[in-house]
Amino acid sequence: MNILAVESSCDETAVAIVRDGREVLTDCIASQVAEHRIYGGVVPEIASRKHVEAIYGLADEALLKTGLTRDDIDAVAVTYAPGLIGAVLVGVNFAKAAAMALGKPLIPVHHIRGHIAANYLAFPELKPPFLCLVVSGGHTMIVEVEDYTKMRILGTTLDDAAGECFDKVGRVLGMPYPGGAALDKAAQTGSDKAYPMPRPKPGENPYDMSFSGLKTAALNTIHHARQLGEEIDIPGLCASFCAAVSDTLVPRVAMALKETGHKQLAVAGGVAANSVIRRDILAAAENLGVKVYLPPLSLCGDNAAMIGAQAYYEYLAGNTAGMELNAYATKSILGETL
Ligand code: KG4
Ligand code: ZN
């Protein structure tokens, strides 16, 4: 089954063709990062307009690159939530029009389910059940993937997502948007003991996390040093920050692995590219005799192939939509409107 998949929830316009949920025939991406960089973050209105400009050409490019014709497409999939509403709407409307014109099923896909499914593309042997750590720009959660379309959230951030904090701290340090990758690189040469950073334990649920205090602590450290005219040890600050994020995530994942007994762990989302988190997750899982799936960096960030992968399993579960499909800025991974 060839699925034409569309992703436009943030600042990447992407169209992919994925066969049977596992084989990427092509994955075309038009990144808008350069457009948003001068503003230090994504400007929603610019994002929507850029999606409109790019999406038709990308779909043509996907067909051209694979040598497939429109008749070879068996279904159209699209990220319908969550994301910047104007941006998601562009993809949803394009996908609806394509599905109607082709007379093929329309498959709505939750963006975070897509991030998890990136692992199916990277690791053909991976099948549910498994535990998944989701760390993206907008989401941070520990999820039990009981089946391809059946999930349980064990814990989530109660405030900011890890990626948001990376971007904010990176921005204040003068790093180009999005700051996560630059901050990770700077951390390589620093000491993670350079600055004290908090590791909060919020709420009743031991799997829940909090990052806003850590973000504030990092920002205060920077502002304080600037006010006093003191030099900031940037690699040390980045290393201390990465260590605190990792110390918030990894022990909770280890606890979840122990308590649930899962023997497979997948990691998903843009922040899964972080080298400190990758190193610590590998070490923790090895200690517990758990197999870890860490997607390559190209599949950690936003792309349409991951949407095509999840779409196949949503289709098998009967989760298709009609022309009434709407876009949602927020929606839980379990499908509940928030
Ligand atoms: O999953 P994603 O591409 O988009 C969302 O769905 O949000 O994640 C983007 C996030 C950004 O916050 C970016 O700074 C972060 O992933 N990121 C990283 C790294 N590479 C990307 N954060 C930490 N370390 C990295 N190496
Ligand atoms: Zn994403």
Image (spheres, rainbow, N blue to C red):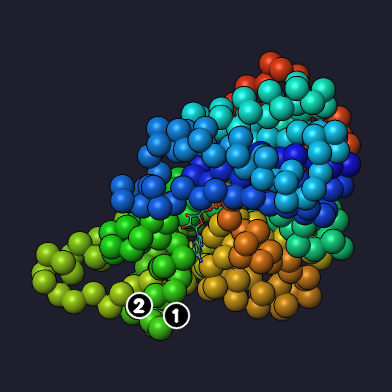
Query: Could you tell whether 118 is left or right of 41 in the image?
Result: right
Residue at 77% x, 71% y: name it: 290
Q: Is residue 214 visible?
A: no
Please report contact status of discs 1 and 2: CB closer than 8 Å, yes or no.
yes
Circle 2 sits on which residue? 235
Q: Nearer the viewer, residue 243 or 199?
A: 243
Judging from the image, what secondary structure is the residue with disc 2 in? Answer: helix
Residue at 71% x, 31% y: name it: 108
Judged from this view, the residue extending furthest toward the top is 324
Residue at 18% x, 76% y: name it: 231
Query: Could you tell whether 230 is left or right of 9 in the image?
Result: left
- At label 2, the amino acid type is Pro
Horizontal and vertical percent for residue 257?
73, 63
Horizontal and vertical percent for residue 194?
33, 79
- At label 1, the amino acid type is Gln
Residue 84 vertical placement versus 280 (above, below): above
Disc assigned to residue 319: none
